[in-house]
Image: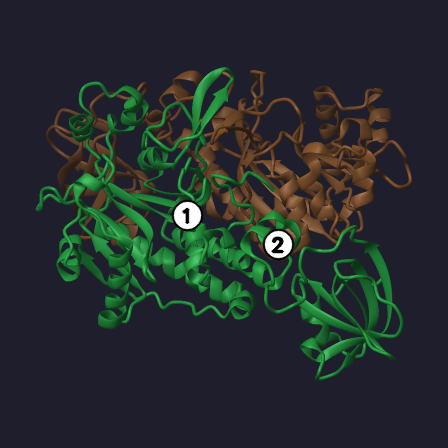
Chain colours: A brown, B green
């Protein structure tokens, strides 16, 4: 039995008889000759033969002689091929997968995800996402972080009262976790530096291009920080690691989509919230989408950076566990990171003293009792951040909708496939 | 400002004045001298001084002169130290964290996880788990796999009717996914080889030492296999990668727990289910725990292996998507992997032809419609497996209860912390 060769390796086998396997990406039957373009996970390969060909998306093994042909994909093609059909499609795809462009609207793509994502341009964002996650992990691993796995079923909706999914937990009410926030903070007490890559759930009633009911959160938290600036420095390393790993592992996907990978500056420029408000002439306690776009353009103009930190958001707009700026009451040690006009990451320094939590939560800590117990046992100054993987991928690939960076999105209307 | 040095690095700084930071692991106040043992993520460091010391679990920075003392942990200690307290504990831990043994029962440990897991022996399994997951990923990355993220909220309880958690999904019924089975199979059609590390949910009504309502599943699935043997070969690589990465990254945790890491044979021995039944003199369609133990001992005796594949389980005991053995009707191309007396992994070859699914599911495919759509578009022969991370960690560390390898377990009775 001849073992399988991948299409990207074919050129190394010129003159040999080899077997490739994959899907019939395209067939072209001319009067005297037929071309079968086979697709596997590494690319395309061409076989030349005469006669009928299996329909598109048939699964085939093609055994043939690797023959140099500068006009074929990869510079070689298979001649004198024998074709074995491993599986035949029962129905045709909803659109032609072999066309360079995608002749279908997003709902059609999502409804038919198992087959639609075979299109190289629709598959590419996920190859970029996989490389990005790998880069996130390796950057944090090299900084002494420990990966953790935390519960997704929780007893109370602690992070924010609204937008939680309720569960029937053995007859008791429970909820899907909106974030691993409290668990990652508690685990700073055990491992000092932790990260988690996992699903988070938001019963998000808004039907927008940016919101999902489930997304993948890249969470990190670290102890013994001076303040939020140490957290920002780690975030910078994570982003650089993600970009670098995309360059290294997902070059073909980057090329397919024509993605321009960003430069992550050694130090990402940073402005205080109050400066941002002054520059944009606004005085709301939060930044509008238009301001975020303006600030991103400013950062590029002024600092040549596609990334910009906005620090010191007003305490009123940040969660209760946010550490205030000791020198500017009312402002926080919380930050956002803008990337190409949009908020991509939220983070900051957290409260770490037990007494400070009691002060903000009051005497009746109720559902926060378990959370607070970690702080009763001595916690270092700490902080962290969370990157939405799908949002990062969408921003990087220029997707207009975050669903294009989600294999099987979940939202207000969509629960299948 | 002096930047922080980790306790494991202290010996490199002999003679210098440095700052360490961590928790007061133990204080010993003798008549004329006091010892403060500080714990950070890399180990312990000793400071020698006179006078009162902060209580255990206080968070401190200690600045002192690194002085050689062969009797101190790591061969050095900090002399003439200055101590700054960053946070004081509000209450004492439920048991002494500095004793080598753990003087507490499992429920106490679980109830107080945020502080109990600071004990080096209770923390160690999670350092081993983190290293194991990293090894799983790097082994599969090097074999051309793509990491995926799939939905944890699903429209129907497709894998098995019972033991699912129901969710209120925007007023509609939905369920927590029991496995990424169908999604990983569908994604073989897109990426050929995929893996996912993520939570799975079982409304497990049994209160045992082996079952959890949420656990971390290391799932893999690959296309273009000959049969289940190609899947077993990949599983062997994953297990070898996991073990190797534990050795490389978690040496200290391995030493703390006295773990004997297994040798993963180049080819893991394998016996057919019917042989296993003959050897153990049973004829049920499944193996009992006693048989699993016996077979593990046999594999060690006969093959010097702590791992054993049992192949060819009867079709009646395997899920509907299992591929039958073409040569032995009634038996499957499914396998289990036994490790140290217990089933650790389940896997096998799956059906891949659309017609075969229609044949087993009948005309009214109902909730499987979305699942089947992938197979309607041409799927290669494929198979995969799933490793329970907590079960692997527990088995490796000799833990009697899988909860000792779960940061915050979820079960019939436990929903907090």
Task: Identify the chain of the residue marked 2, using the numbered disc in the image.
Answer: A
Q: State whether residue A66 appears in this view.
A: no
Q: State whether residue A42 appears in this view.
A: yes
- Quarter of the image where one finds residue B187: top left
Dot label at residue A320: none
Q: Position of residue A85 (x, y in %)?
A: 15, 35
- Quarter of the image where one finds residue B201: top left
Numbered disc 2: secondary structure:
loop
Label 1 to label 2, Cα distance in Å?
Answer: 32 Å
For the residue pair B122 and A54, the one nearer the viewer reads as B122
Query: Where is mark 1, residue-wise?
Result: B208
Q: Position of residue B408 (x, y in %)?
A: 56, 46
Q: Looking at the image, is B121 positioned above or below residue B197?
A: below
Q: Position of residue A117 (x, y in %)?
A: 38, 29
For the residue pair B190 and B301, the one nearer the viewer reads as B301
Image quadrant in which the C terminus of chain B is located: top right
**Residue that protrudes farthest toward the bottom in the picture:** B70
Q: Is residue A272 left or right of residue B254?
A: right
Q: Is residue B316 left or right of residue A295?
A: left
């Amino acid at each position: 039995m001849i073992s399988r060769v991948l299409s990207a390796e074919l050129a190394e086998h010129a003159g040999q008889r080899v077997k490739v396997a994959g899907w019939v990406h395209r067939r072209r039957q001319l009067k005297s000759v037929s071309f079968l373009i086979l697709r596997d996970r590494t690319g395309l390969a061409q076989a030349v033969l005469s006669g009928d060909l299996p329909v598109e998306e048939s699964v085939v093994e093609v055994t043939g002689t690797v023959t140099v042909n500068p006009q074929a994909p990869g510079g070689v093609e298979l001649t004198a091929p024998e074709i074995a059909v491993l599986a035949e499609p029962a129905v045709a795809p909803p659109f032609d997968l072999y066309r360079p462009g995608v002749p279908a609207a997003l709902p059609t793509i999502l409804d038919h995800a198992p087959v639609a994502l075979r299109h190289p341009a629709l598959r590419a964002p996920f190859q970029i996402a996989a490389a990005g996650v790998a880069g996130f992990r390796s950057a944090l691993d090299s900084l002494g972080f420990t990966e953790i796995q935390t519960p997704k079923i929780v007893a109370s909706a602690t992070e924010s009262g609204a937008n939680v999914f309720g569960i029937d937990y053995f007859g008791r009410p429970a909820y899907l976790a909106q974030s691993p926030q409290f668990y990652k903070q508690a685990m700073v007490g055990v491992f000092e530096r932790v990260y988690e890559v996992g699903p988070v759930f938001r019963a998000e009633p808004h039907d927008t291009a940016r919101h999902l009911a489930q997304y993948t959160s890249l969470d990190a938290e670290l102890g013994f920080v001076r303040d939020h600036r140490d957290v920002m420095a780690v975030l910078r390393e994570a982003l650089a690691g993600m970009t670098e790993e995309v360059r290294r592992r997902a070059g073909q996907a980057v090329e397919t989509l024509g993605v321009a990978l960003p430069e992550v500056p050694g130090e990402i420029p940073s402005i205080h919230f109050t400066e941002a408000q002054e520059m944009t002439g606004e005085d709301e306690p939060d930044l509008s989408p238009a301001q975020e776009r303006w600030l991103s353009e400013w950062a590029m103009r002024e600092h040549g950076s596609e990334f910009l930190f906005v620090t010191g958001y007003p305490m009123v707009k940040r969660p209760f566990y946010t550490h205030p700026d000791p020198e500017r009451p009312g402002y926080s040690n919380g930050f956002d990171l803008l990337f190409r006009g949009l908020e991509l990451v939220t983070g900051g320094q957290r409260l770490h003293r037990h007494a400070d939590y009691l002060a903000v939560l009051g005497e009746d800590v109720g559902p926060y009792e378990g959370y607070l117990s970690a702080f009763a046992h001595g916690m270092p100054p700490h902080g962290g951040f969370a990157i939405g993987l799908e949002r990062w991928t969408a921003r990087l690939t220029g997707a207009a909708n975050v669903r294009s960076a989600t294999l099987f999105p979940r939202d207000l209307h969509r629960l299948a496939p």
